[in-house]
Amino acid sequence: MAKACCGPGYASPAEAMQAPREKLLYTIAIYTGTGIQKPDYLCTIDADPESPTYSQVISRLEMPGIGDELHHMGWNACSSCHDDENMERKYLIVPGVRSTNLHIVDCGTDPRNPTLFKVIEGSEIKATTNLSAPHTVHCLGSEIIISMLGDAQGNAPGGYLHLDKEFNIIGRWENSMGEIKFGYDFWYQPRHNVMVSSEWAAPNTFMPGFDLEEVGHLKYGRELHFWDFEKKEPRQTMYLGEDGLIPLEVRFHHNPDSSHGFVGAALSANIIHWWKDTAGEWQWEKIVDVDNEPHPDWPIPIPGVISVILLSMDDRFLYLCNWLHGDIRQYDISDPHKPVLTGQVWMGGLLGKAPEVNGVKVTGGPQMIQLSLDGKRLFVTTSLFSTWDNQFYPEIRTNGGCMLMVNCDTENGGMEIDPDFVVDFGKEPNGPSRCHETRYPGGDCTSDIWI
Amino acid sequence: MTKVTVTLANRQGQTFEVDPRKTLLASLSEQGVDLPYGCKYGGCITCAARLMSGSVNQSAQVALNNRQINDGYIILCVARPLSDCCLEIGVDSHGKLYRNPFLDPLADHELKADIAAPMKENT
């Protein structure tokens, strides 16, 4: 039955998979922490193989000031307001983790040349909500919530900033943070009245860089929180312990009826799966455990450091990146309790398996990924966070980051790095920059939620 | 109000007269020095510089561990000079600021102040 409405996004995940192929990519690039005194910027990249500028940056939108550390970003609208014909997926909300500034970027008026529409100053956010360090942006019907990892002084746990659709600050979204110690990513699944949030650390802990000893001093997260989404308060906490050190990206199945979801525990290098059992209780289990790998120069084996995961729109494949090892893995999670490894590719990393790809020296490892709606093209960037890059991959200061594309076999499983696509951020006009999260004008596999 | 003199060792020894009530980031930026910065609340090390001589009050900083402090690093967005100072600024002063945490772990007394063990006395 055809839908009569014409709001943003798609009526269902299945409809999203039939959308036209993405022809533009929006990717963040940073100079914060690099020694180049230029603002971070949003790149528009040509992803149309028929275009003469395919695989090139075709426009750059600089932020007004330096030092934002752009990181993650999100759309003003997604499939959660598909029924609302007054909404449009037009603006990217692009936060600066360090500055707390929120940049509202108009990508709709001229998709090839986004422009800055509005800036919500970090000083205003801190003054009105006592929050700082914005991270994940999700639209919420017609409104927007953003996980904020610290209070105005950078202490945990922070909270959630609530914006209206005109980008005015409403205030704090949550009614209570309960006993939550840290914030990071979140995803909601309204048909189960649940939101799940994960834990990185206080901004004052992770922004200066990673001290391993601070994990033992409980300065980093190891818990997962299940919220009563309507009451806007945490209801249940899962203590993941050593299996779940630094749980980062949270992904529910796109199927809005499903209760299954996943989180990547970065330092433990595990995938944690949760679901609601037949008695209505939330359960969790570890389903992937990436072995630490020996290295001749390291006193202890290197952990994978799973910096990101995502699910294909049909919820069949889970992708993860081991930022320190240098591999991307594809698992068939048709049975979410029993993942099957179906593909693996290498780029960069500390194990030396693929120091150069498509003629570019890869500095860093596979980090942020974004999958096309049809599940066939995975775009990958290599920088994690300026201070952490500087610790683990110091050559990135002179080499910059890069973006590659991985072709994914959605029939039989399997992955291959595309030989014709590479964007070398070491050759940017103002000097080597570092690329991070990517989004597509028509939505992608980490932006859209169905209510 | 008595001003103090800040010398930038890695900027051809340029000198600046600054108000000791203001942060070094604010004073130097106002006088045209192009400095990196991030959070402006002392919680990230984007604006770190090295204090070669002199002294500062940076009691508001929470980003540096004790090893970085012992190596002379200061956080310009919260540090106020207590005397004439000589600084190395910018990323070219950050050589000892970043270390691989697995290859080069911190001793208990080198952690951040809130979790560091007391330094053992050398007698």
Image: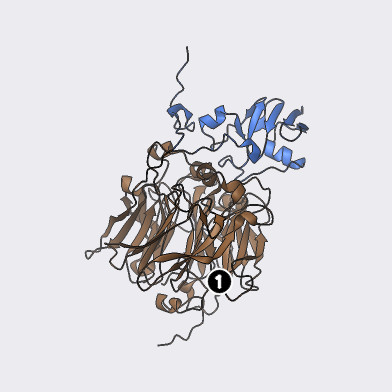
Chain colours: A brown, B blue
Q: Residue at x 51, y 45 (%)?
A: A203
Kindly identify which residue carries mark 1: A441
Tell me where residue B12 appears, x and y as whole percent.
76, 33
Could you say which is closer to the camera, residue A11 or residue B105? Answer: B105
Total residue callouts: 1
Say which chain tag 1 marks.
Answer: A
Amino acid at pointer 1: Pro
Question: Is residue B76 among the parts visible in the rendering?
Answer: no
Residue A258 spot, x, y in % from top left: 32, 69
Height in image: A99 above or below B66? below
Q: Residue at x 70, y 40 (%)?
A: B26
Residue farthest along the left direction in this orientation? A279
Q: Which residue corresponds to the image point at 56% horizontal and 75% vertical from the top-left?
A: A88
In the displayed structure, would residue A201 be above or below residue A272?
above
Image position of A333 (left or right of A168): left
* Quadrant in the picture for the N terminus of chain A: bottom left
Crowd around label 1: few <14 · some 14–19 · many ≥20 (10 Å): some
Closer to the camera in the image, B56 or A340: A340
Residue A33 x/y as whole percent: 60, 46
**Residue B27 point in image, percent of width and height:** 73, 38
Residue A291 appearing in the image: yes
